[in-house]
Image (spheres, rainbow, N blue to C red):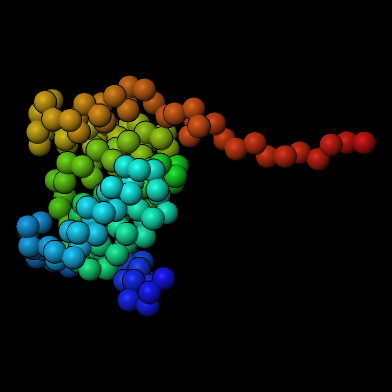
Amino acid sequence: MPVSHHLLLTAGVLALFAAPVAGQRPDNQLSPQSVAFLAQGQQLLSAGKFDEASDTLEAALAADPRNRAAFVSLARVAQKEKLFGKSIRLTNKALALEPNDLDALEVQGESMVELGAKTRAQANLTKLQKLCGNGCKQVTTLSSAINRGPTIAAATPPKIPTAKSN
């Protein structure tokens, strides 16, 4: 891996833990490099290349830590990897930048459902309904997740091996 790409990835990891800066610029004023990394990361996510998507989205945040969509896309990667707590933490970063981010509220609510926090997910749904009514896709998606409940894989605790008696 070239040194410059490695530095961007390292900076991206550090950006994940940085506190958001007050007075954020609008999305259309984000670093063009960050926006390009975001687009590439979203393509990798769609292709199921989660490790590569994560690295590229972290590079997007290194280029511009105000890129909310990169936080939300990283949260989607975490969901695919069944890391629902991580997904919630990442959406919290997006919501710290913009408390009414529809996609962040949806993804966060879906992750809450997977962790069994249906009441908290319902609060996200209520907020989404106030922001965009029942017609937006985020409301439909989160409502379906709440009605469905946790997926079997998420709801089933891992089996702990037991020692066999002789």
Q: Residue at x 33, y 46 (%)?
A: 45
Q: Is residue 41 visible?
A: yes
Direction right: furthest residue: 166
Instruction: List x then y, in percent, for residue 40.
Output: 26, 54
Looking at the image, residue 62 sits to the left or right of residue 148; the answer is left
Q: Nearer the viewer, residue 145 or 122?
A: 145
Q: Is 7 above or below relative to 164?
A: below
Q: How many marks?
A: 0
Q: Residue at x 17, y 59 (%)?
A: 35
Q: Is 105 above or below relative to 139?
A: below
Q: Is residue 96 visible?
A: no
Direction top: furthest residue: 147
Direction front: furthest residue: 2
Instruction: List x then y, in percent, for residue 31.
Output: 14, 66
Instruction: List x then y, in percent, for residue 146.
Output: 32, 27
Instruction: List x then y, in percent, for residue 61.
Output: 26, 63
Q: Nearer the viewer, residue 36 or 163?
A: 36
Q: Residue 133, located in which quarter of the rendered image?
A: top left
Q: Residue 148, located in which quarter of the rendered image?
A: top left
Q: Residue at x 9, y 33 (%)?
A: 132
Looking at the image, residue 76 sits to the left or right of residue 29; the answer is right
Q: Residue at x 22, y 52 (%)?
A: 39
Q: Which quadrant: the N terminus?
A: bottom left
Q: Which quadrant: the C terminus?
A: top right
Q: Residue 21, located in which quarter of the rendered image?
A: bottom left
